[in-house]
Amino acid sequence: MPDELRQRIYQWVEQHLHDEWKEGWDREQFIYSSRKKAFGPFKQALWQLSEQEKQPILEHLEQQFRIIFERLNAVNTQEALTPYI
């Protein structure tokens, strides 16, 4: 994600979700825990990212899903699913 947009999101989280900051958390823990709630207010900015800006995000997500599916042993299942689709 572009640094400028990431910083705007983090600032929004700190300003609007400060009451969710739990005792003992540092800033990094708070941001990690709360950042998903900022997707709504920044939906348009995220949709308007250029293809060049989206590409690293998409590659990272693909890698994460590949790891999950491999751990679940849910790869190469096309043949087994075809009769049901």
Image (spheres, rainbow, N blue to C red):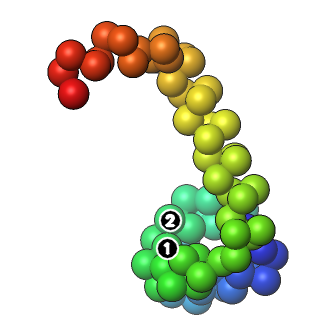
The single residue placed furthest to the right in the displayed view is 3
Q: Is residue 72 above or below residue 32?
A: above
Residue at (67, 37) in percent of width and height? 63
Residue that sits furthest to the left in the current view: 84
Residue carrying label 1: 39
Q: Position of residue 46 (x, y in %)?
A: 58, 76
- Relative to 71, is 51 above or below? below
For the C terminus, the image quarter is top left
Circles 1, 2 touching at the beta carbon (< 8 Å): yes
Q: Secondary structure at mark 1?
A: loop
Q: Give 34 or 58, whichever is nearer the viewer.
A: 58
**Residue pictured at 70% horizontal, 69% vertical:** 51
Instruction: For label 1, count other residues whose C-alpha is less than 10 Å away and answer few (under 14), some (14-19) or many (20+).
Output: few
Residue type highlighted by circle 2: Lys
Along the horizontal axis of the image, is 77 left or right of 4?
Answer: left
Question: 57 or 18, which lies in front?
Answer: 57
Q: Which residue position holds label 2?
A: 36
Q: Residues within 10 Å of mark 2 (few under 14, many from 20)?
A: few
Q: Nearer the viewer, residue 85 or 46?
A: 85
Left or right placement of residue 65 versus residue 8 in this view: left
Image coordinates for residue 49, horizontal then vertical, percent: 66, 77
Q: Quadrant of the N terminus?
A: bottom right
Vertical placement of residue 60 versus 25, above or below: above
**Quarter location, residue 53:** bottom right
The answer to whether residue 10 is visible is no
Query: What label sits on residue 47 in the rendered view?
Result: none
Quadrant assignment, res 78 = top left
Left or right for 51, reference 19: right
The residues bearing labels 1 and 2 have C-alpha atoms spaced at a distance of: 6 Å
Callout 2 secondary element: helix
Classify 80 as above or below 65.
above
In the image, residue 70 lies at what x, y percent?
56, 18
